[in-house]
Image (cartoon, grey):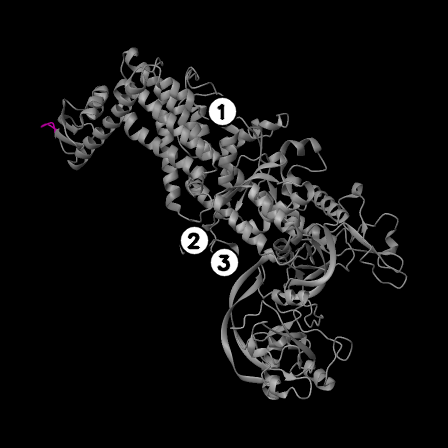
């Protein structure tokens, strides 16, 4: 784009007779793709590269307006940086692994994955889907169906993003389950394993009983649930303790976990429990001897002051178990039922073994709720339930995609060391630039609240496998402490089908052979590497050095604890630096009841029909009006406002460009004042974008554009059409300068209509044009005036617009046409303002069809309007 002071354009602008918004998305989308307008040029030097770690949307169903909202925010930043001369690295990915995809595949094809089934290369899904009798398929067959369904979804997602006008480089699209992502994920994991940053352990693990998989702390959410509090008596274990034993009362909402009890705890300062601490008690129904100990986390004001420690009822149990070195007595099976346990063996002793076995037989195999109901009946019968259960409402932890509360089971899982890096991660968060700044507190609260290392293994099928096998000894025992790592040259690998170096397929599962790791990585363990995947770490070192660390991570505030945190952690562990310089945080889209829109709540609005009804630019306008980090209500009315803005830009551009006289020097005071004001708007919009406040940049640009249309264009119509070139040349120059600036200021928000009007008179794409330069505009506006005179000229523009507004108001109240003649206008104002009015009086007389303007000094602004006698009612 030529500099504003030259204002060179096409010699003969081609302005349509009836410009329209219809069809602009298809027209310009095709041109952008054909011309590679948004293609990343990797020949650019590093200092000119602006790289974006774009969120890969989850491919599970359909996108909703919440996606349009946040992805538009990112796109406005990308477009601004491109116009600032940066080569923007802006890829997009699809997050297509994980539970949502598996569930869709199961329901869509009527299958379930069974790793014991052999791969069938000719497998075809059943023609009729049966939810009750799904067809069992091998893991490779199941993965193929997942890929088939996600590919279809991805095509629909891409069509929507293209319609919305995202300026991503479609040639750099990736998927989180593709070969590139698998190689990057597996390579990073092997590096962590080699450096001791990853480890495997059989330990208490958060577990979803429906999906039968481990989940991470970051994937939990609290939900209010009704329950009951039960007061239960524990009896003294030794003779002579009867008096104190009578006071061994606990209150619990989880009586079904009494057989898993390993201790009772009191607060160290609780005088009521002095006679109990240090002694043993027996669990009701099962007669297991457990100690009464103390711990400062016990809240003495709650219940009886004694709490039951079970392995494991909640995360606090895990803390107590670990810190007090308590034994493990686990009763929950992975399916959420009470497992068969070996009463009478070490760890399962009882003072009354027959009773323990008989009582547990009443619970074995039952679901948690069934076991809870039955054990309450048994406690009532035995007299060990004290009083009636009390109804309570409590916050219960759920896996965010689950339907039953999470449990804690003991299982073998892979972990990434996290807790030991807590202080370093806090420091990383403070090194990061946050927009808005207060979002950093959410990150720090999460890091400070971590209770354990990150469990990254999942017992599912569609995801990135751990690139490991384990030797099997001669007795058939799997040696988990001797993992066999895949060779880097062989990545990606699938241990369920591939064979480790030095073995052959016949040795799978055999004594002296090997076993593949059956688990996959948590979806966040892959998504935490999106900068490395997009930048092709370990694949294309030149590209990676060019784009990493990236400039910005845009995302919503609810996944600061998951995606943002985990990406910071992985970059810190692998590279000892931040993955990006800036975090730009978006808010949620709320429904009319001010609740977050989400597919799980069933309150989402799908966007395609909105794009078709209002146009992509209108939808983008609504999205970009949402403040950074602020939740915003869905408002179709705002889209109508955006569409009016786009239509106004069409019409204003047509007015300014059609039959535009030759331009000359910016000689008129009002023209110079306009360009000076425009320069100030450019300053504000530029600073707002630099602060990632796209909403402020839009608000400032839009407000001045409407003022420009409502007042300046009306004021200069007379000079615009004056046959004397000496009169029209100045306004012609002002119109070209201002129109060029407005089209570029609005281009990040309204890419289709701005490209359309730009094409009428400029070469190339507006989205590759330079961002308006406030200094150049100011220089043009100041060519014929010193500072004092510029201030007077600005005052002239302001008061001329104020008077014109009052004249229009008078005509509107009188219900006459806007071109109706006015015989006399009396302007009351300060001497300074009235003096300035003289500079714009000629334009004002013409614009208001005014015969005579009179002035009178006053402290407050007022206008008297006398319509001509022959004026007729409209």
Residues at badges 3 and 2 in contact (C-beta under 8 Å)?
no
| Residue located beneath label 2 in the image | 591
Left or right, 455 with respect to 397, comes to: right
Residues at badges 1 and 3 in contact (C-beta under 8 Å)?
no
Instruction: Note whether residue 61 is visible.
Output: no
Relative height, residue 203 to residue 785 (above, below): below
| Residue located beneath label 3 in the image | 601
| Residue located beneath label 1 in the image | 769
Which quarter of the picture shows residue 264?
Answer: bottom right
- Crowding around mark 3 (Cα neighbors within 10 Å: few <14, some 14 to 19, many 20+) is few
Of circles 1 and 3, the one toward us is 1
Q: Whole-Å distance between the Cαs marked 1 and 3? A: 43 Å
Helix, strand or loop under label 3 = helix
The region drawn magenta spans: 867-871
Q: Does the magenta stretch include residue 868?
A: yes
- Crowding around mark 2 (Cα neighbors within 10 Å: few <14, some 14 to 19, many 20+) is some
Left or right, 348 with respect to 759, comes to: right
First of labels 1, 3 by sequence position: 3
Q: In which quarter of the image is the C terminus?
A: top left
- Crowding around mark 1 (Cα neighbors within 10 Å: few <14, some 14 to 19, many 20+) is some
Helix, strand or loop under label 1 = loop
**Residue at 56% in and 53% down:** 446
Helix, strand or loop under label 2 = loop
**Residue at 17% in and 37% down:** 813
Q: Whole-Å distance between the Cαs marked 2 and 1? A: 38 Å
Where is residue 668 shown, x and y percent of the image?
Answer: 29, 17
Q: Is residue 748 magenta?
A: no
Residues at badges 2 and 1 in contact (C-beta under 8 Å)?
no
Q: Whole-Å distance between the Cαs marked 3 and 2? A: 11 Å
Instruction: Note whether residue 276 is visible.
Output: yes
């Amino acid at each position: 784009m030529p500099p504003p002071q030259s204002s060179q354009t096409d010699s003969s602008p081609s302005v349509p007779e009836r410009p329209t918004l219809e069809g602009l998305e298809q027209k310009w989308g095709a041109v952008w793709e054909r011309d590679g307008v948004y293609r990343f040029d990797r020949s650019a030097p590093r200092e000119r590269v602006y790289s974006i770690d774009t969120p890969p949307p989850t491919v599970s169903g359909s996108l909703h307006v919440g996606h349009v909202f946040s992805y538009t925010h990112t796109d406005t930043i990308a477009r601004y940086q491109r116009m600032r001369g940066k080569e923007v690295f802006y890829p997009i990915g699809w997050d297509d692994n994980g539970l949502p995809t598996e569930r869709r595949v199961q329901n869509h094809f009527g299958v379930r994955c069974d790793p014991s089934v052999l791969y069938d290369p000719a497998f075809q899904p059943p023609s009729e889907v049966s939810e009750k009798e799904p067809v069992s398929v091998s893991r490779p067959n199941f993965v193929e169906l997942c890929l088939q369904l996600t590919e279809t979804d991805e095509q629909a997602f891409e069509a929507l993003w293209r319609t919305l006008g995202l300026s991503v480089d479609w040639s750099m699209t990736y998927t989180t389950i593709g070969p590139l992502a698998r190689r990057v994920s597996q390579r990073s994991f092997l590096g962590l394993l080699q450096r001791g940053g990853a480890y495997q352990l059989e330990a208490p693990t958060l577990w979803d009983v429906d999906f039968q998989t481990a989940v991470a702390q970051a994937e939990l959410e609290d939900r209010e649930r009704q329950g009951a509090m039960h007061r239960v008596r524990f009896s003294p274990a030794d003779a002579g303790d009867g008096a104190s034993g009578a006071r061994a009362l606990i209150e619990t909402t989880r009586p079904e976990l009494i057989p898993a009890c390993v201790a009772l705890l009191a607060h160290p300062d609780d005088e009521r429990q002095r006679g109990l601490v240090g002694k043993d008690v027996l669990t009701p129904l099962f007669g297991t001897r457990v100690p009464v100990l103390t711990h400062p986390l016990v809240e003495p004001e709650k219940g009886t002051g004694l709490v039951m420690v079970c392995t494991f009822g909640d995360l606090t149990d895990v803390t107590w178990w670990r810190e007090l070195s308590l034994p493990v007595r686990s009763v929950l099976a992975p399916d959420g039922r009470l497992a068969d346990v070996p009463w009478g063996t070490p760890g399962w002793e009882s003072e009354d073994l027959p009773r323990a076995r008989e009582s547990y037989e009443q619970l074995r195999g039952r679901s948690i709720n069934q076991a809870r109901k039955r054990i309450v009946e048994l406690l009532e019968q035995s007299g060990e339930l004290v009083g009636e259960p009390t109804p309570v409402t409590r916050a219960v932890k759920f896996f965010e995609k689950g339907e039953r509360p999470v449990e804690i089971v003991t299982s073998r899982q892979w972990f990434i060391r996290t807790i030991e890096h807590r202080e370093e991660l806090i420091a990383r968060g403070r090194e990061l630039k946050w927009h808005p700044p207060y979002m950093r507190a959410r990150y720090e609260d999460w890091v400070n609240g971590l209770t354990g290392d990150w469990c990254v293994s999942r017992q599912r099928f569609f995801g990135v496998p751990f690139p490991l096998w384990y030797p099997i000894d001669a007795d058939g025992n799997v040696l988990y402490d001797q993992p066999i790592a895949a060779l880097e040259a062989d990545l990606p690998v699938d241990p369920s089908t591939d064979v480790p170096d030095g073995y052959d397929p016949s040795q799978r599962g055999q004594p002296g052979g090997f076993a593949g790791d059956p688990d996959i990585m948590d979806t966040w363990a892959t998504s935490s590497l999106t900068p490395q995947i997009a930048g092709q770490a370990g694949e294309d070192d030149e590209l990676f050095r060019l784009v990493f660390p990236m400039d910005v991570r845009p995302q919503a505030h609810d996944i600061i604890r998951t995606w943002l945190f985990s990406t910071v952690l992985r970059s810190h562990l692998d590279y000892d630096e931040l993955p990006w310089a800036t975090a730009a945080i978006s808010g949620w889209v709320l429904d009319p009841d001010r609740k977050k829109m989400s597919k799980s709540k069933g309150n989402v609005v799908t966007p395609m029909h909105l794009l078709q009804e209002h146009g992509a630019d209108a939808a983008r306008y609504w999205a970009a009006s949402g403040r950074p980090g602020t939740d915003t209500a869905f408002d179709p009315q705002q889209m109508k406002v955006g569409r009016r803005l786009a239509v106004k830009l069409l019409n204003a551009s047509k007015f300014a460009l059609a039959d535009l006289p030759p331009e000359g020097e910016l000689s008129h005071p009002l023209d110079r004042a306009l360009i000076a004001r425009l320069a100030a708007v450019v300053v504000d919009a530029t600073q707002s974008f630099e602060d990632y406040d796209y909403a402020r940049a839009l608000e400032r640009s839009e407000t001045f554009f409407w003022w420009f249309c409502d007042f300046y264009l009306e004021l200069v119509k007379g000079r615009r059409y004056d046959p004397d070139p000496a009169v029209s040349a100045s306004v012609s120059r002002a119109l070209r300068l201002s129109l060029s600036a407005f089209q570029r200021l609005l281009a990040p928000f309204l890419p289709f209509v701005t490209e359309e009007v730009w094409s009428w008179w400029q070469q190339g794409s507006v989205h590759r044009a330079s961002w308006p330069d406030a200094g150049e505009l100011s220089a043009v506006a100041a060519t014929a005036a010193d500072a004092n005179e510029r201030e007077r000229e600005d005052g002239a523009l302001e008061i001329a617009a104020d008077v014109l507004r009052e004249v229009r108001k008078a005509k509107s109240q009188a219900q006459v046409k806007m071109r109706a003649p006015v015989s006399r206008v009396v302007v009351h104002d300060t001497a300074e303002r009235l003096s300035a009015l003289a500079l714009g009086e000629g334009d004002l007389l013409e614009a208001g069809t005014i015969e005579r303007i009179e002035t009178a000094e006053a402290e407050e602004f007022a206008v008297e309007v006398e319509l001509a006698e022959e004026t007729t009612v409209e």
